[in-house]
């Protein structure tokens, strides 16, 4: 059985290391990108099964990423947004643009795994 | 001493504390002291203005009686705020960890002052305690990953300290805020509460008062606290490896 591919867009190496490890252990093929430019380049050539993205990223924010995926790529790939506490405005904005779910920092990898599985099961 | 006079004295003291000498006070001590005085002043202001409003609205014939009552109510209020402020100070200190763990509440202000100062200095000597077992659980017991996370944490914190110095020099509060935002998640993830709290204050300072002196002070707090946290992390890691 093919592994589900997951794009992890997160510029914080510390958080990304832990999430990368746990998501791989959880059976996903993880593609980690550390800035919005790399994320955009990746998405122009690949279609992941799910995207997990931080809101605040260099070059291209998580909000811009959602807009890009939904409006330019016309893709309905599930997007889970990672947001800091107190960033409610951005989270609402993300949902309006088409994000499927959000998880707030500090991220619990176990919780993220559950949310990823839930989104993939909806497809 | 009248409450108002006390307030003026506190205001003077507060303004002096803004220019405190880091050679004489540690940054943690000065920060706690300044915050305690700010709480004290805030409570006094509330009492004075509340009472003043009642006084102005009253019939002039009753004002003399009210003055006497006010004096008494100030005295009573002063006794009440002793406890309130003391509680506020305790709450404030508690947010910095187990600062007043050993502290017993006494009823007279003099004794309290001594106890607060003793409690503070004791706590400052104490290194923060960090429990890595939860993170190790998230790492599914992989010590190599935990070690990698500690290395990344260290490098992120050092990067922040460097960036903060540059952004403070150029008074670029937006970039300082961003740098603080970037390091914050990692601090929360590693459960380094004291550093996390300082970074939250830095972000608030960058967004609200934008006072370079206060921000510099907070960044110095971070710089002072980081080695303690790093030692605590290293100690916690070696404890885990020894088990």
Image (spheres, coloured by chain):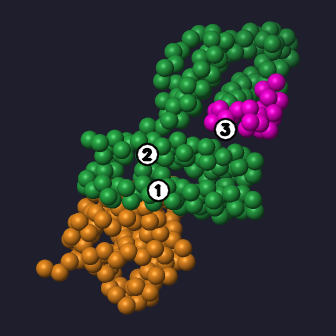
Chain colours: A orange, B green
Residue tagged 1: B153
Q: Which residue is mark 2?
A: B233
Above or below: residue B177 compared with residue B25: below
Q: Are marks 1 and 2 in contact (CB under 8 Å)?
A: yes
Q: CA distance from mark 1 to mark 2?
A: 10 Å
> Label 2: chain?
B
Q: Quadrant of the N terminus of chain B?
A: top right
Which residue is rendered at x = 31% and y = 50% of the image? Answer: B136
Which sits earlier in the primary sequence, circle 1 or circle 3?
Answer: 3
Q: Are dots 2 and 3 on a single chain?
A: yes
Instruction: Tell me where residue B106 appears, x and y as whole percent.
Output: 56, 11
Marks 1 and 3, how far apart at CA: 23 Å
Which residue bears the numbered disc 3?
A: B27
Secondary structure type for disc 3 = helix
Residue found 50% across the figure and 65% down from its top: A90
**Chain for numbered disc 1:** B
Judge left or right: residue B2 versus residue A1: right
* Image coords of residue A38 (percent x, y): 46, 82
Q: Where is residue B209 drawn, in percent x and y?
A: 72, 50
- Please check whether the numbered discs 1 and 3 fall on a single chain: yes
Between B10 and A14, the one nearer to me in the picture? A14
- Specify the segment rendered in magenta: B9-32
**Viewport quadrant of the C terminus of chain B:** top left
Q: Point out the tag, 1 or 2, that comes first from the N-terminus.
A: 1
Q: Is residue A82 left or right of residue B126?
A: left
């Amino acid at each position: 059985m093919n592994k589900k591919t997951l794009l992890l867009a997160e510029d914080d190496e510390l958080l990304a290391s832990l999430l990368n490890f746990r998501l791989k252990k959880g059976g996903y093929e993880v593609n980690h990108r550390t800035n919005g430019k790399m994320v955009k380049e990746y998405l122009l050539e690949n279609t992941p099964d799910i995207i997990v993205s931080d809101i605040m990223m260099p070059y291209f924010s998580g909000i811009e990423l959602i807009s890009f995926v939904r409006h330019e790529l016309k893709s309905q790939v599930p997007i889970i947004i990672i947001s800091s506490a107190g960033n409610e405005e951005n989270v609402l904005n993300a949902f309006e643009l088409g994000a499927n779910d959000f998880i707030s920092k500090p991220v619990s990898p176990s919780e993220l795994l559950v949310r990823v599985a839930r989104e993939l099961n909806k497809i | 001493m009248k409450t108002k006079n006390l307030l003026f004295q506190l205001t003077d003291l507060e303004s002096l504390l803004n220019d405190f000498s880091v050679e004489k006070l540690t940054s943690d001590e000065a920060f706690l002291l300044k915050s305690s005085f700010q709480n004290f002043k805030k409570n006094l202001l509330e009492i004075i203005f509340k009472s003043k409003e009642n006084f102005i609205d009253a019939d002039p014939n009753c004002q003399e009686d009210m003055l006497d009552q006010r004096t008494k109510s100030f005295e009573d209020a002063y006794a009440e705020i002793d406890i309130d402020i003391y509680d506020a100070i305790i709450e404030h200190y508690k947010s910095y960890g187990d600062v007043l763990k050993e502290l017993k509440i006494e009823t007279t202000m003099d004794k309290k002052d001594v106890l607060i100062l003793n409690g503070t200095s004791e706590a400052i000597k104490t290194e923060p305690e960090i429990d890595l077992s939860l993170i190790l659980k998230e790492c599914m017991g992989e010590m190599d990953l935990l070690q990698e996370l500690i290395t990344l944490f260290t490098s992120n914190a050092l990067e922040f300290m460097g960036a903060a110095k540059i952004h403070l020099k150029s008074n670029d509060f937006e970039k300082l805020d961003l740098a603080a935002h970037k390091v914050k998640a990692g601090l929360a993830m590693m459960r380094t509460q004291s550093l996390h709290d300082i970074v939250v204050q830095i972000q608030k300072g960058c967004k609200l008062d934008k006072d370079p002196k206060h921000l510099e002070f907070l960044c110095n707090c971070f710089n002072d606290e980081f080695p303690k946290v790093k030692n605590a992390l290293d100690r916690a890691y070696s404890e885990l490896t020894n088990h």
